[in-house]
Image (cartoon, grey):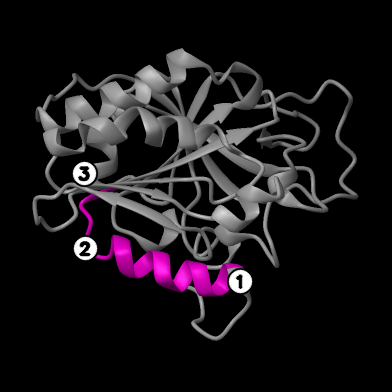
Amino acid sequence: MKLYQSSQTHKPFLSIVACQHGNEPFGREIIEALRPRLEEFPGLQLIVANEEALAIDQRGVEGDLNRSYPGNPTGNHESRLAHALLKHVNGTRYLFDIHTSVSSCGFLVPIVAELNEDTRSVINLLEPSRIVCIERPLSSTSLIGNVNAGISLEFQKSLADQSAIDIAVKLVEDLYDCRRAPTRARDVFMVTGILEADLALPDTARDFELVEELDLYPVLLKDPSYMGNQGLKATRKEVMAL
């Protein structure tokens, strides 16, 4: 784990975590874009989480870091790392967890474990109209499920480019400038479980589109994050003023 912090001593205000999965190196580009500006943002800490998995371009070394929280100091590599990482982000006001997905989820999908005042204020600084909420206990082994205001920024891997880096940097700037954006209607996809490997999905199934015969919405369809399964299943509700 590589940690970068401002020289100013502050309680963590915003923690940005990248590369929990070693085969998702894009988040490191966001870290590198922000590193030269650390002194502008007191209380910002930047974390490259799983350097060992990154070095071998594998999802994990002995497990899946984002399925290992709250961790165990005597467990396998990812479990020990989860335990140590949580100590560093303890008390942070906000946490952004950067991921890329091979699914056709769209340019950016914010994922939260809880729609509270802090996560809503961050979401309103972002453009996407689709929000995914994975409530506890389903999210209890993920990083965002173990902090107060954790948001995963899930970029579609094939679309993650300089514009994605710019969005992440602007989000940091807006948060530190205390910018408030007007609320607006969003589609919130409430995750209800896993799309099991043996579930017969029609060939026409697409992310965030209703599969009428099964009465569900696929989320992160065919993403290897859900090893042995097909992704997540969700219900949809429109929230008029998030």
Q: Residues within 10 Å of mark 3 (few under 14, many from 20)?
A: few
**Disc 3 designates what residue?**
117
* Residue displayed at 45% across by 20% down: 164
**Disc 1 designates what residue?**
77
In the rendered view of the protein, which quadrant contains the C terminus?
Answer: top left
The answer to whether mark 2 and mark 3 are in CB contact below 8 A is no
- Confirm whether residue 188 shows in the render: no
Distance CA(mark 1)–CA(mark 3): 34 Å
In the structure shown, which secondary structural element does the residue marked by tag 1 occupy?
helix
Question: In this rendering, which labeled residue sits more in front, label 2 or label 3?
Answer: 2
* Residue displayed at 20% across by 52% down: 93
Distance CA(mark 2)–CA(mark 1): 24 Å
Callout 2, which amino acid? Answer: Gly
Could you say which quadrant of the image residue 204 lies in?
top right
The percent coordinates of residue 12 (x first, y second) are 19, 55
User: Which one is in front, 45 or 174?
Assistant: 45
Q: Main secondary structure of the magenta part?
A: helix
In the structure shown, which secondary structural element does the residue marked by tag 3 occupy?
helix
* Residue displayed at 58% across by 39% down: 235
Give the extent of the magenta segment. Answer: 78-94
**Disc 2 designates what residue?**
91
Question: In this rendering, which labeled residue sits more in front, label 2 or label 1?
Answer: 1
